[in-house]
Image: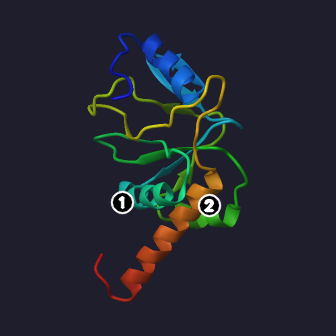
Amino acid sequence: MILATCYSIHEVAFVYRQRYGLPVDVAGGRPSIITSGDVGAVVMPQEVGRLVHEELSQSSACAVPVLTHPRHHPWVFLVRPDRINPAAAQLLSRHGVSIVDTGKRVWLPKSDSHADWYWASAPGIVSAGRWMLAPARSRVLGSAKSVIAKSVATRSAGGIR
């Protein structure tokens, strides 16, 4: 429960900024971030996202912040932007994995309730004045590519889906 002590949307934004280092904006009564050179997002289907999160959590020293929605079910990974391999991004897009363009809004949970956007995996707490802890975008995309390749190989071999 990361927002249990918040009583207003401005308190929620304050917690995100101060405790988690997220560059939060409040728009339309909701906390959000605008993707930039400091923070990015990668969206993928829930099934792929679960496996990517598991792989990254086992091999990473930093938090792997992931948002999801109870009705829409995409997994949205918050990432540190870095290089993009256009060919790999195009291949991944065929499997529902997409990179959120710079300048786009990503809505953040406004409470700990699972009735709307919520944290499937919460961001890590940072020291004062630090940016969020998150894996590099290339690392998330590489893990997604690996997970998808394993899934395709299993299906090609006639394995269980």
Tell me if mark 2 has few (under 14), some (14-19) or many (20+) residues whose alpha carbon lies within 10 angstroms of its own. Answer: some
Tell me if mark 1 has few (under 14), some (14-19) or many (20+) residues whose alpha carbon lies within 10 angstroms of its own. Answer: few
Q: Can you identify the residue that label 2 sits on?
A: 89
* Residue 112 spot, x, y in % from top left: 32, 28
For residue 86, above or below residue 15: below
- As drawn, the label of residue 47 is 1
Q: Circle 2 sits in a helix, a strand or a loop, which is it?
A: helix
Query: Which circle, 2 or 1, is nearer the viewer?
Result: 1
For residue 53, above or below residue 23: below
- As drawn, the label of residue 7 is none
Q: Decide if residue 9 is on the left or right side of residue 63.
A: left
* Residue 36 spot, x, y in % from top left: 68, 35
**Residue type (three-letter) at the residue carrying disc 2:** Ala
Q: Nearer the viewer, residue 134 or 137?
A: 134
- Looking at the image, which residue is at 28% across and 34% down? 114
* Residue 21 spot, x, y in % from top left: 58, 28
Q: How many numbered callouts?
A: 2
- Looking at the image, which residue is at 34% across and 24% down? 111
Outermost bottom residue: 157
**Residue type (three-letter) at the residue carrying disc 1:** Glu
Q: Quadrant of the N terminus?
A: top left
Alpha carbon distance from label 2 to label 1:
18 Å
- Looking at the image, which residue is at 32% across and 84% down? 159
Q: Earlier in the sequence, mark 2 or mark 1?
A: 1
Q: Nearer the viewer, residue 119 or 116?
A: 119
**Which quarter of the picture shows residue 110?**
top left
* Residue 38 spot, x, y in % from top left: 68, 36
Q: Nearer the viewer, residue 63 or 11?
A: 63
Q: Circle 1 sits in a helix, a strand or a loop, which is it?
A: helix
Q: Decide if residue 98 is on the left or right side of residue 119.
A: right
Q: Decide if residue 84 is on the left or right side of residue 146.
A: right
Q: Quadrant of the C terminus?
A: bottom left
